[in-house]
Image: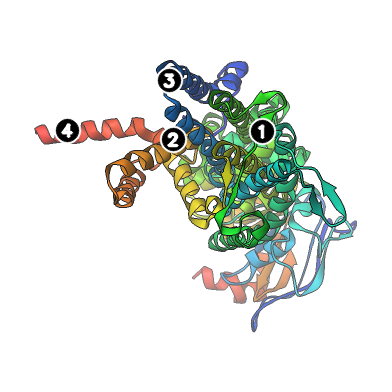
Amino acid sequence: MADLSLINPDRQSRLLASAQRFVPALVLVVALVGILAYAQSAGDTFLIRVFTRIMIFGIVAVALNFVLGFGGMVSLMHASFIGVGGYVVAILAYHDANLEPLMIGPFAFTGTSDLAILLPLAIVVTVPFAALTGLISLRTSGTYFIMITLAFNQMAYYFFVALQAYGGEDGLQIINPITFGGLDLSQRSTFYLFTLSVLALTLVLVTLLVDSKFGIVLRAAAQNERRLSAIGIAPLRYKLLAFVISGTLTGMAGALLATGQQFISPADMSWSRSGELVVMVVMGGLGSVSGPLVGAAVYLGLELILESWTEYWHLAFGLLIVAMVTLLRGGIADLGTLVPWLGRNVSGGKN
Amino acid sequence: MSKPFLEVRNLVKRFGGLAATNNCSLEVMRGETHALIGPNGAGKTTLISQLQGQIRPDEGHIFLDGQDITETSMERRALSGMARSFQISSVFPKFTAIANAALAVQARKGDSFRFLGAAWLDRAMMDEAREAIELVGLGDRAEVLAQDLSHGERRQLELAMVLAMRPSLLLLDEPMAGMGKQDSARMTRLLADLKKNYTILLVEHDMNAVFALADRVSVLVAGRTIATGSPADIRANDDVKAAYLGHRQH
């Protein structure tokens, strides 16, 4: 599938090549609509909840992969973006339910439970957070980048732990039903479709970005920064902008997560969650735009299944991840290559 | 003669106690191919890195077309026409050959903050990239990932990227490094073609290539130019023979 090369416009119809990029995303979106249709006809609300969660983490994984797989930045602070976006929703919904305005210095803000306001607000809050932390983190690279983003994640985590007015370590419940304009998002299937729309937009956006001139520079920076400077492009601005875009998409997903589980707590933004996000991305495949969505589905699905089988599911889970990473170097997107590998072994056994 | 296009004045770069560039001065005239030779460890690559801006000198000045660029960033220098090829091939391994060249075109045009249209839909850019790829003889390897190219082909790709920048000054750091005889001869022919249109500062160990290509030669020994002159002068120069050629030719 999408390797990191450019398609030759001479050999293929440019329009076709342009459209083909969206096929994997389209297939996944159609499949997700199908799952909803099936769950509704079977009256399976559990399935709807599971896949809503998968889609939310799918948005995060796709956004994270934009900086990790394409930009070469291993961020361990993406859970903190989930937290920031989630707390924007939870805190304003809390003020809406209490009818107390939120006081920031001399300014009073009335609360709201409308995502049409809350989502843009989550963006407004995440952008400066991502820009500031990104600007500092991107002064380093490699292992140091990983460590500094980890540190930022923990700072954000303990900030919300210390925020006693909003539940501290216990987190914050959302009591009011969350809406989007006139849409009632406490309706499970409505929220499913709403989340799916955000996911679809994210997939389209990232697909466009990675092949754009901006995206090409980002991918080049991941491969060889010295060469990029030598041809006249300073990588920092591009990496920073990519980091902010990724963090903001993740913040929006955080707002959806809080809405879906009617709750947000520091546990949703722990550093181990950041690590899990990286595992989802690596499982799905770093080289493709929609692979990480599959990675998120497999990760959360496995977690759910193994959890129901045994108390020691972490062990089985760990072994599975090791097996996957060794056998599928390109992630689940590489599953096809495993088949001839199996075939070769089988025929070898016969001889 | 007119003013030099590139002028290096009393450049010094120390690494700890070692002066890798030791009060070095050099002039490259517009349109000339100027070879920089010297024994291993003479500081040739260090000098090139300072010219390109990757390393900042401790003392001295660098002028490009009369402008002091000593403190100018690498990126600015590249955009003002200074193009460097690296001694150890430095390309984007996961891009195709033509994509490597296209990125160099894109950098020059400065339109990298475009977010929606696919880069490869920019026909003018791709045409220019293809032209550069074909010029260096990689036409039928344009769609191959750079990591799958042979060593010699990667050297050619380096040169294609340099040319795609439409440079006014080429800094070529051992373009024939590690090449076999055949590739080496082809690269020499290619450079002989290019020297008609470009100002070139060429670092090279292959003396046949140097004497075939260079209009003038400077000899760098222990971080300092000990002689500059026509290839014939340099061959006849006793200091040079003692310091450099002498070692190599017996």
Quarter of the figure with residue A95: top right
Q: Earlier in the sequence, mark 2 or mark 3?
A: 3
Q: For the residues carrying marks 3 and 4, which lies nearer the camera in this image?
A: 3
- Find out whether the residues at labels 3 and 1 contact each other: C-beta distance under 8 Å: no
Quarter of the figure with residue A167: bottom right
Disc 2 chain ID: A
Same-subunit check for callouts 2 and 3: yes
Judging by the rendered image, the residue that carries numbered circle 2 is A297
Q: Earlier in the sequence, mark 3 or mark 4?
A: 3
Q: For the residues carrying marks 2 and 1, which lies nearer the camera in this image?
A: 2
Q: Amino acid at mark 4?
A: Val
Q: Earlier in the sequence, mark 2 or mark 1?
A: 1
Q: Amino acid at mark 2?
A: Ala
* Residue B78 is at least partly visible in this image: yes
Q: Secondary structure at mark 2?
A: helix
Same-subunit check for callouts 4 and 1: yes
Q: Counting other residues with Cα less than 10 Å from the Cα at mark 1, is it few (<14), some (14-19), or many (20 or more)?
A: many
Judging by the rendered image, the residue that carries numbered circle 1 is A212
Disc 3 chain ID: A
Residue drawn at x 52%, y 39% is: A57
What is the x, y in percent for residue A114? Answer: 71, 33
Q: Earlier in the sequence, mark 3 or mark 1?
A: 3
Q: Secondary structure at mark 1?
A: loop
Numbered mark located on residue A43 in the image: 3
Q: Nearer the viewer, residue A256 or B63?
A: A256
- Left of B27 or right of it: where is A241? left
Judging by the rendered image, the residue that carries numbered circle 4 is A346
Q: Amino acid at mark 3?
A: Gly
- Find out whether the residues at labels 3 and 4 contact each other: C-beta distance under 8 Å: no
Between the C-alphas of marks 2 and 1, the distance is 28 Å
- Find out whether the residues at labels 4 and 2 contact each other: C-beta distance under 8 Å: no
